[in-house]
């Protein structure tokens, strides 16, 4: 499951992760400490662990995995102080130093007994005493907590965000990249700036540094490791991205075709992003061929890449990234039959109509939506939700990425009856539901079926009929999860889909995405979801800006428009079924061609000889000297 599966092992080794933070929260620093409960009493207990200072919370991770992680929201704190030695009732007076007392009205207990589950909420006033190993840091820690506490107490979210940003920028300004982290003393520094590393739902601030040999990122908090290093010689692709509606993202790949990148960076201004892009692009331009949507289109049209590969490339070019759940790669529903015992890929009725968006597949529902659309004041939109959003992505992936769902939904799983329980139910709801218009994700056409199985034995709740949420219920024509994926892949590469996929591309990435063509195709979403739909720099009110960003994060974003004219059909031979290897490629020998349009490899030896001989009849226009080899 692209990025998400790669992160799971790390989560089980280290219980703390940035997913324990709230959305748009930063992790600043950590200190080795003891958490003391009932100090001075007979039942006094002391737990050793790590105290994490975050922009909106205090988190204590005990070394003992049986004990829960404690998360104290700063907004729920009553007082934060270092008790004075002359206080008569001070529990630190005799044998303790470096102590911080936190009194709060609410605490969250997370991963008790190291089990991933919804957070437990403890309400009521409690006091927590934290004893730092290094007592000399006590003053700075308390001062930082007081600053962050004041920010959390501000009434408006925009004011809170502004104050936290000021604190963050002050910390970044006081630090710089540690040049001792260079791989070689002979490296030449080309650029250094502030940035954030982006992973699903969270960002991590730090310093970016590029030399003549390497790209580095050093997190401000040293998490999850002191430095991320990428050798420029290994870079194969680099893309500018929009992040949070702003052109400030940059994604770097060290592979030719993988969807998951090696690093995704978000800069504080587009000038830094563009300068870093130029430095890396200049380095790699001599040995990397840049592919455009048109070049991939020609490869796909001639059958040199599969439908799956083409959709991955288009998603990548349209700013879709597995590191950004509001812009996660989007794939189409292909199969419309989830009740038959045998899946017949020769029958057109087996397939979904790819010429229409999900919201237009059910005429009765569409009529209701169009009536509302006609009566709606400007700006008009037909659908109240999007076909791709963080919630939808995690709806499909909750069984392999439960901590992402808990992060997105404030420590809770969704209601059991709203979970991804059944393929047939989910498809039916996409056809009939008043607000459900979601498409699929690449995992449905991959080889890893783990997202369909509750292998982590998560307690995802009990449905109304009393049945526990376990594995996803598959259609009768699938003998198991792997067989379901295999048949889904076959459907994606089938002749019917190859003949009609260009129609879906027109809707999602093409000329029917915007304007009058979108209206005619019943493909109009909220204006904020489109690139250029709002200029954040023109919004002076910080509260309005935060509200817009939050709305987009939850609602999802429309891909960048790649084509402005109708997408050509694929050249598909009749009565020939496309097959796809495990690497999702179609061999040159299997390349489909039109009977009226021969490809060079299909010519006879005689025809090839005649073709080369005809070169002699061509008139020479200009000559160029090229490399001798």
Image (cartoon, helix red, strand yellow):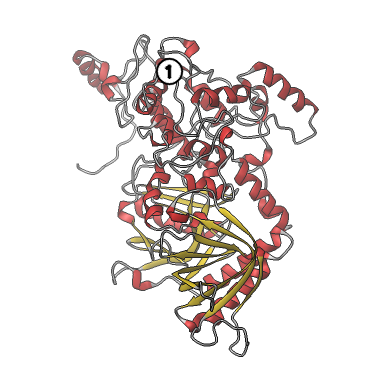
Residue 458: % across, % down: 46, 42
Left or right relative to 32: residue 186: left
Q: Residues within 10 Å of mark 1 (few under 14, many from 20)?
A: some
**Which residue has dot 1 on it?**
476
Horizontally, residue 289 falls left or right of residue 25, namely: left
Farthest residue toward the bottom?
Answer: 86
Q: Residue at coordinates 46% horizontally, 26% vertically from top-left?
A: 473
Which of 533/53 is in front? 53
Image coords of residue 609 (percent x, y): 20, 18
**Element carrying mark 1:** loop
Front position in the image: 33 or 547: 33
Q: Residue at the spot x=41%, y=30% of the render?
A: 310
Q: How many numbered callouts?
A: 1
Would you identify the image quadrant in which residue 399 lies?
top left
Image position, residue 152 (x, y; %): 66, 65
Residue 626 rendering spot, x and y as whole percentages: 26, 42
């Amino acid at each position: 499951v692209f990025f998400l599966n790669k992160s799971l092992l790390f989560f089980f080794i280290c219980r703390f992760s940035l997913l324990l933070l709230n959305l748009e929260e930063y992790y600043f620093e950590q200190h080795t400490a003891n958490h003391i409960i009932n100090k001075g009493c007979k039942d006094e207990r002391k737990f050793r662990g790590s105290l994490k200072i975050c922009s909106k919370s205090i988190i204590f991770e005990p070394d003992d995995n049986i004990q829960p992680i404690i998360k104290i929201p700063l907004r729920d704190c009553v007082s934060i102080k270092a008790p004075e030695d002359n206080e008569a009732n001070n529990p630190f007076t005799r044998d303790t130093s470096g102590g911080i007392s936190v009194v709060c009205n609410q605490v969250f207990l997370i991963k008790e007994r190291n089990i991933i589950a919804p957070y437990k909420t403890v309400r009521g006033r409690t006091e927590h005493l934290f004893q730092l190993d290094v007592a000399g840091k006590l003053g700075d820690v308390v001062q930082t907590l007081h600053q962050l506490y004041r920010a959390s107490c501000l009434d408006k979210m925009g004011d809170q965000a502004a104050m936290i940003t000021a604190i963050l920028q002050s910390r970044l300004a006081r630090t710089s990249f540690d040049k001792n982290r260079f791989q070689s003393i002979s490296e030449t520094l080309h650029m250094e700036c502030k940035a954030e590393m982006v992973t699903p739902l969270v960002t991590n601030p730090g310093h970016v540094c590029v030399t003549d040999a390497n790209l580095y990122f050093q997190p401000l908090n040293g998490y999850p490791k002191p430095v991320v290093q990428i050798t420029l010689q290994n870079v194969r692709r680099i893309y500018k991205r929009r992040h949070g509606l702003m052109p400030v993202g940059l994604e770097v790949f060290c592979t030719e075709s993988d969807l998951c990148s090696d690093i995704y960076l978000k800069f504080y201004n587009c000038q830094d992003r563009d300068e870093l892009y130029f430095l890396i692009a200049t380095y790699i331009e001599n040995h990397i061929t840049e592919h455009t949507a048109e070049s991939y289109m020609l490869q796909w049209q001639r059958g040199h890449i599969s439908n799956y590969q083409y959709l991955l490339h288009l998603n990548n070019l349209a700013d879709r990234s597995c590191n950004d759940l509001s812009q996660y790669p989007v794939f189409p529903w292909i199969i419309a039959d989830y009740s038959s015992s045998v899946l017949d890929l020769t029958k057109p009725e087996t397939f979904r109509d790819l010429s229409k968006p999900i919201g237009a597949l059910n005429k009765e529902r569409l009529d209701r939506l169009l009536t509302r659309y006609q009566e709606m004041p400007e700006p008009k939109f037909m659908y109240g939700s999007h076909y791709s959003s963080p919630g939808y992505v995690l709806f499909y992936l909750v069984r392999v990425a439960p901590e992402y769902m808990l992060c997105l939904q404030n420590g809770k799983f969704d209601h059991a009856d709203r979970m991804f329980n059944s393929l047939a139910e989910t498809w039916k709801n996409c056809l009939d539901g008043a607000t459900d218009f979601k498409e699929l994700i690449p995992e449905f056409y991959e080889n890893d079926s783990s997202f369909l199985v509750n292998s982590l034995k998560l307690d995802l709740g009990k449905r109304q009929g009393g049945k526990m949420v376990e594995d996803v219920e598959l259609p009768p024509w699938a003998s198991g999860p792997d067989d379901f994926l295999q048949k889904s892949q076959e459907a994606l590469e089938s002749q019917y889909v190859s003949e009609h996929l260009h129609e879906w591309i027109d809707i999602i990435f093409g000329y029917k995405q915007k304007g009058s063509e979108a209206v005619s195709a019943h493909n109009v979403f909220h204006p904020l979801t489109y690139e250029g739909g709002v200029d954040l720099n023109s919004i002076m009110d910080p509260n309005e800006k935060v509200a817009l960003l939050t709305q987009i994060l939850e609602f999802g974003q429309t891909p960048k428009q790649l084509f402005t004219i109708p997408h050509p059909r694929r050249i598909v031979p009749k009565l020939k079924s496309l097959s796809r290897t495990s690497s999702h490629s179609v061999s040159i020998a299997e390349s489909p061609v039109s009977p009226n349009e021969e490809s060079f490899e299909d010519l006879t030896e005689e025809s090839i000889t005649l073709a080369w001989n005809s070169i002699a009849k061509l008139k020479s226009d200009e000559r160029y000297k090229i490399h001798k080899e």
